[in-house]
Amino acid sequence: MSPKLLPLINTRHGSRSAKTCEYRCANQCDAPTPNTSGNEEFQTLAQRAIARRAMLTGSAGAMVLAGFGAQAAAAAGTAHGHHPRPERNVGRASFTSVAPNRKDDVVNAEGFTHDVIIRWGDPVTKRAPRFDVHHQTPEAQAQQFGYNNDYVGIIPLDGRRALLSVNHEYTDPELMFPTGTDELLKKKIEMAAHGLAVVAIEKGRAKGSWKASDPRRSRYNRRITASTPLRVDGPAAGHELLRTKADPKGTTILGTFANCSGGTTPWGTTLHGEENFHGYFDASGALDPKQADAYKRYGITGQGKGWKDVDERFDLTKTPNEANRFGWIVELDPLDPSAPPVKHTMLGRVKHEGCNVTIARDGRVVAYTGDDEKGEYIYKFVSRDRYQRSASPAARRHNKTLLSAGTLYVAKFTGDGDADGVHDGTGTWIPLTSEKKSYVPGMSVAEVLVHTRLAADKVGPTRMDRPEDIEPNPVNGKIYCALTNNSDRGKKFTTDEANPLASSMTRKKLGEPLTATSGNRNGYILEITEGRGRSCGKGYETSTDFTWDLMLICGDPAAQETYFAGFPKEHVSPISCPDNVAFDAVGNLWISTDGNQLGSNDGLFRVPTNGPERGRVQQFLTVPYGAETCGPLVSPDQLSVFTAVQHPGETDDATFEKPTSTWPHTDAFPRPSVIVSYAK
């Protein structure tokens, strides 16, 4: 079926449909705000930065334009013209930004194209049967590529082969199953469609292209589902809060789900964040009163997906501790198919968007993670032991233990006024616990790790606007975090002089004028520089203090509140709701979006973080109608950009028989897929 233009219908929270809100996060935006701690909010600290930038817009813009010179003129001159064949290096290539659109297709920047590497239902294991959507079984789905791919990681094998490590976050039953499919069968298939996948891939004929290898020839391919055994690691392993009748030792957990983003470690494993786990648990009766505060703090209500009909461990009335066994960072070793994935309790239990790791100057490992919900916190972990750079098997075994012991911190941001004109504030990493000592009064080490939100509330960190992906830039050493949005700013979250973005400029449909809408609707990109003064920047990630800057205040460049690191607004693409981030070899920030509030499909954007083009947002691609942009990942050779296209056609009126998207146009229904873009 050929691509088609479709109207924007039945959406909420920007381009998100009610279906997205229900299936992905159990409508958490409509629930009472879990964080009622009264801790300071980040919007309070952003006030002076935004006010100062508004005053300096004219002079700063003039300075940037003066320094930009012929390069800016050349870029402006080709904005609407024909480009020659682009440079293949995607970090340095010049391209015309993709215009906002509502097409039911992936639209690449001119001069680039893309291939679909793998789709929902494609074979993963050697014995995977051919995908037959009308006769699907749980056994078949457990061997096939799962639904709603999100995080994308790449582990090289050699010069031509690699392993693709992917999250399968959640399912859309109304798009997956023909009308009349048995309800219990649906649930079993959905459980098998969650989790993780490891898929061998190989380079294609065109430079930068990749394709899935024949699974019959790969010993690495495997699926992890909601029923696969995982090992529990770290100080909370075996604690009574993790024990169940089926697992009295509290050391083996069946399954992982709600896996959103993730990260790749220097030792060749991948990390996977369990995010919206709260919406998977039912209750046949009363909830455990001993855990009432913790349930409430995590948004657990006992209204789940009906999985208790398949497995009673999802009935909190019968297994009250089962919910404590999710919300962790999972480490997977794609190179060892026999190794069970590991849930690292040392990294704390929150709604992890993902986790990204760097090596500090002293050799210790530092991991960053965001808790993706309105008003939640940013966390950092610093390992006790040091990374071994040897390529020996012994060194790799050692490195795979580095996330098991160390210190977990939570961030507090402080505004420092506008006198220095450089940074927007300073901050402190507040210790929560080490593997041996809790720093939170009245809570043990294990209690801090299992009930991390409750522990963090007690030490006064800063409440953020949905901290999602957070990742170190390997070139400049700074840390970048996507703060997606907060539609309740000014409603559930108080506003005053220190909370400026109680209103944002948005548009309901493409082509309509911008209108003022309550809340922080378009989000920020937060830039953190670890350390202060002389011990500042790359290599100082173990520092307990930092400076911070709002690099981007997202939205339409025509909106007064937007800011693009001082870059002239007339040269940037509109960007709304940043979600995942990645970097290329020259330090450019790549941003994928989720829930565009400006009338367009979501997309992927490239943004320089240094030099005269710092802040120049350019849209590299858009995803199909109703889809979200996930991943992303730029290959080390800079020839390939991997993107996960999640939930195409996820609109309120869509059904299996009457879809609003058929992307990737290989069937009469949509199939979430991983793609790779490269120069033609």
Image (spheres, helix red, strand yellow):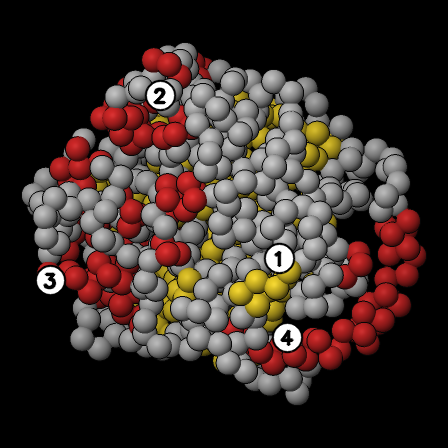
State how far apart marks 3 and 2 are (Cα).
42 Å
State how far apart marks 4 and 3 are (Cα).
44 Å
State how far apart marks 4 and 1 are (Cα).
18 Å
Q: Residue at x 54, y 46 (%)?
A: 15
Residue 355 visible, this orientation: yes
State how far apart marks 1 and 3 are (Cα).
44 Å
Residue at numbered disc 3: 290
Residue at numbered disc 1: 506
State how far apart marks 2 and 1 are (Cα).
37 Å
Task: Give neighbour class at mark 4: few <14, some 14-19, many 20+ (Cα, 10 Å).
Answer: some
Label 2: state its secondary structure: loop
In the displayed structure, does residue 472 sit left or right of residue 551? left
Amino acid found under the numbered disc labelled 4: Ile
| Mark 4 vs mark 1: in front | 1
The reply to whether callout 1 and callout 3 are in contact (CB within 8 Å) is no
Residue 41 position by quadrant: bottom left
- Position of the N terminus, as image quadrant, is top right
Residue 346 on image: x %, y %:
30, 58
State how far apart marks 2 and 4 are (Cα).
51 Å
Residue 501 position by quadrant: bottom right
The reply to whether callout 4 and callout 3 are in contact (CB within 8 Å) is no
Which of the two labelled residues, at mark 4 and mark 3, occupies the earlier sequence position?
4
- Position of the C terminus, as image quadrant, is top right
Foreground residue among 123 and 249: 123
Which of the two labelled residues, at mark 1 and mark 3, occupies the earlier sequence position?
3
Residue at numbered disc 2: 179
Amino acid found under the numbered disc labelled 3: Lys
Foreground residue among 584 and 304: 304
Label 3: state its secondary structure: helix
Residue at numbered disc 4: 50
Which of the two labelled residues, at mark 4 and mark 1, occupies the earlier sequence position?
4
In the displayed structure, does residue 198 sit left or right of residue 485? left
